Image (cartoon, rainbow, N blue to C red):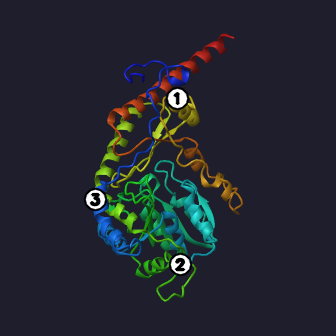
Amino acid sequence: MAADAQTPGLPASMGGIPLFQEKFRFIKPTLPSWTDVSNLYEHSYETQMITNSDLVGNLEDEVEERLSVKECVAVSSCTSGLMLVMKALGLKGEVIIPSFTFFATGHAALWNGLDPVLADCYSDSWTLDPIAAERSITERTSAIIAVHLYGNPANVDALSTLATKYGLKLIFDSAHAFGSKYRGAPIGQYGDAEVFSLSPTKLLVAGEGGLVTTNDASLAAAVRAGRNYGDTGAYDPAFVGLNARMSEFNAALALAGLPLVSRKVHKHNQIAQLYTSLVSDIRGITFQSVHPQDTCTYKDYSIHINSGLFGMSRDALASALAAENIETKRYFYPPLHRQRVFSNLDHADVRLETTENVTNGILSLPIYESLPDEAVRRIAFGIRRIGTAQEHNNSSSAVQQRGV
């Protein structure tokens, strides 16, 4: 049986009864109904036009209208979209990237033969710090690649001003941000291009897939060619591209899911607010800040653990929650500048103190649309129970040491 969340007791890691009888899932995507998907896909399947047909174009048209952007190009993944945007923009030399991001952001630059210069993040929003980005600019810099981390919009205005000042391209990795808003306007219309992910952990799901949005028609045309090996239709590729096309089935899944996005964003925000309200009084726990005029999708809800104040490390808390059958993630740890793939960069020895402080304490908690409020309360109770028990142990140890 599972422990009653109203009864303090001992944490499972200390011999108590786990809060959940079985392993509690970290993510459980909400998909549109199969009827909606199959109705959309039926014509493509029956005509055997399962790629390069109408559904991908329909998805692109609907996204353009929804995000108030001139161009949308559907691709096979966010990573391939980032790769193609960098290729189409003709980037050379160095590109500035936050070290606190999923590694695909940096991989896309490496695939293009670029030199990622890893920069520090804000201590509160955890997005790229424009001041740190400016310090990283050299004569070899060609672009800034910022990330709307967890769906929290980056400082678009400051980064746009910075890119203009130095004549740099500006790309947003918007993998987490379909449904986010910056100062009330949809994410997707900023910089030279934004690139979204439609993988199963996102709020808009295509199975696998990505979207490139831009107000630059020539850039969109180049990305469209790039997703088809660089071929513009003459069977004579203009440049080396990829097979990065989205299938009709993936487009059908995304089209059927579009009407669900606003409700998902609202629910994720409700869950985030509930988590925060339940653990905000616990010493050593802080949260990602979101500008009051912005909307975050909370693709992930992450807390930050200050081990000195909380009484135990992030990893120790994760292990204790695992004993309660609560799955957590360390999104995204280690940061890029501590990963092997980036260790041989010219700038690999850079000290990113804010990034290290933030990522050393990051712990992502379960969040998805069907997550019951009671489960959120139980998880929050688990954190509180573990912290209280650890504080008692630490106090007892201190008393014993003084006695000695």
Q: Bin the neighbour count of mark 3 within 10 Å (Cα to Cα): few under 14, some 14-19, many 20 and up.
A: some
| Residue 148 coordinates in the image, percent (x, y) | 45, 57
Mark 3 or mark 2, which is nearer the start of the sequence? 3
Looking at the image, residue 85 sits to the left or right of residue 296; the answer is right
- Residue 198 in percent (x, y) is at 42, 60
Residue 58 vs 232, above or below: the answer is above
Amino acid at pointer 3: Asp
Q: Residue 126 placed where, x, y %?
A: 49, 51
Q: Which of marks 2 and 1 is in front?
A: 2
Q: Residue at x 41, y 78 (%)?
A: 216
Q: Nearer the viewer, mark 2 or mark 3?
A: 3
Q: Name the residue under label 1.
A: 323
Q: In which quarter of the image is residue 61?
A: bottom left
Tell which circle, 2 or 1, labels the residue nearer the N-terminal end.
2
Q: The residue under label 2 is which amino acid type?
A: Tyr
Instruction: Tell me how far mark 2 sits from mark 3, CA to CA.
Output: 32 Å
Residue at the image position 42 percent from the left and 22 percent from the top: 3
Query: Which quadrant holds the N terminus?
Result: top left
Q: Name the residue under label 2.
A: 229
Kindly identify the residue that appears in the image at 64 percent across and 71 percent down: 113
Which kind of residue does numbered mark 1 sit on?
Ala
Measured as percent of width and height from the top left, residue 283 is found at 48, 31
Tell whether label 3 touches label 2 (CB within 8 Å).
no
Q: How crowded is mark 1: few (under 14 residues within 10 Å), some or many (20 or more)?
A: many
In the rendered image, the residue lying farthest to the top is 403
User: Tag 1, which secondary structure?
Assistant: helix
Residue 36 circle label:
3
